[in-house]
Image: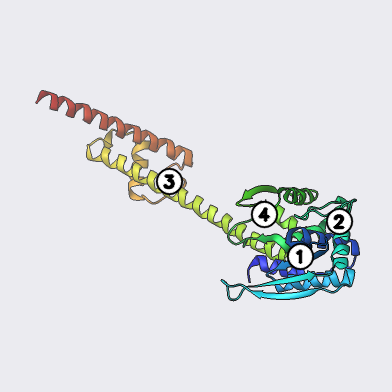
Amino acid sequence: MSFSSDARDEVARDIVKARHCRLAELSAIIGLNGRLSVSSEGRYSLSLHTENIAVARKYFTIIKKTFNIVTVISIKNNAYLKKSRTYTITIGKHEGALAVLQAAKYIDREGNVSKNLLLQDKTIVMNACCKRAFLRGAFLAAGSISDPEKFYHLELVTSDMEKALELQHVITAFGIDAKIVGRKNNFVVYIKDSDSIAEFLNVMEAHVALMNFENIRILKEMRNSVNRQVNCETANINKTVSASLKQIEDITYIKETGNLHTLTANLREIAEIRLEFPELPLKELGTMLNPPIGKSGVNHRLRKISDIADSLREVKEVHNGYKEHDN
């Protein structure tokens, strides 16, 4: 199973005892997964849809425990995906559907309900515990979270901008940064920051998913830290090797042009040691001198040798230029 499925199943298993929290959770489910049908006589029927059997079981349990009304469960196989099924819980009787819609705050003071199921009374998410329950319902109905091994992304998908804003408002009440983006005909409320995703899981009280998420985060951070350290050490080694090769090239050039004897005793000493020990870092080269000197002192002497080699090369270029001109 995916990380998202595991998190959804964990949330689906938790049935809160407080009626007001169950109603808040059911309200989010209805708004994001519900379909309202109105007959020609103005009578309601309400259905909730999901492809997750654990989620379907929770829908049924919440309605049964909260309202004790009759629901019909139907299962439909997906024509394109053989293993995929859609579970539908239907409240077919008008009185039952009306009671659920009223309790979930989807009916206004005049007794009307919007066809796209917009929340009519925000008091259902007034308490912090009810906000948590509302977000649990929203995640069950329309949420998903990416595998944190790959990247960090949590989203809630809705077909209505007003619903997306409502979700964003509830999420930000917990200090979590959530943004909204349009995607085809939908609006997506998403969270990309790993700390914010961890807090969202904590708010939903998905503690097992949170623990697994944090474990993966720790391992990723450790791997990234090791990779950074290895890259840094590799870069330093490459830099040291490149510098050593340039120093040897300069010393060899001075030697081949017969100018090694022109160097001062200090420069000649470091030049001979560098040729003998090309792999040693500057600090260790300094300990082999008499008297020993530090890394900066060795670097200073090797720079002087490099300047002398460059000067000799310039003189040779000028001399060759004159010869070509004379010819």
* SS for dot 4: helix
Q: Which residue is mark 4?
A: 194
Q: Is residue 248 visible?
A: yes
Q: Would you say 307 lies left or right of 284 here? A: left
> Where in the figure is residue 239, as x and y percent of width and height?
43, 46
Q: Nearer the viewer, mark 1 or mark 2?
A: 2
Q: Quadrant of the N terminus?
A: bottom right
Amino acid beneath label 1: His
Going from N to C along the chain, the mark reached first, 1 or 2, is: 2
Going from N to C along the chain, the mark reached first, 1 or 4, is: 4
Label 4, residues with CA under 10 Å away: few <14, some 14-19, many ≥20: some
Residue at image point 73% right, 64% down: 140
Q: Mark 4 and mark 2 in contact (Cβ < 8 Å)?
A: no
Q: Which residue is mark 2?
A: 105
Q: Which residue is mark 1?
A: 207
Q: Looking at the rendering, which quadrant does residue 98 occupy?
A: bottom right
Which label sits on residue 239? 3
Q: Nearer the viewer, mark 1 or mark 3?
A: 1
Going from N to C along the chain, the mark reached first, 3 or 2, is: 2
* SS for dot 1: helix
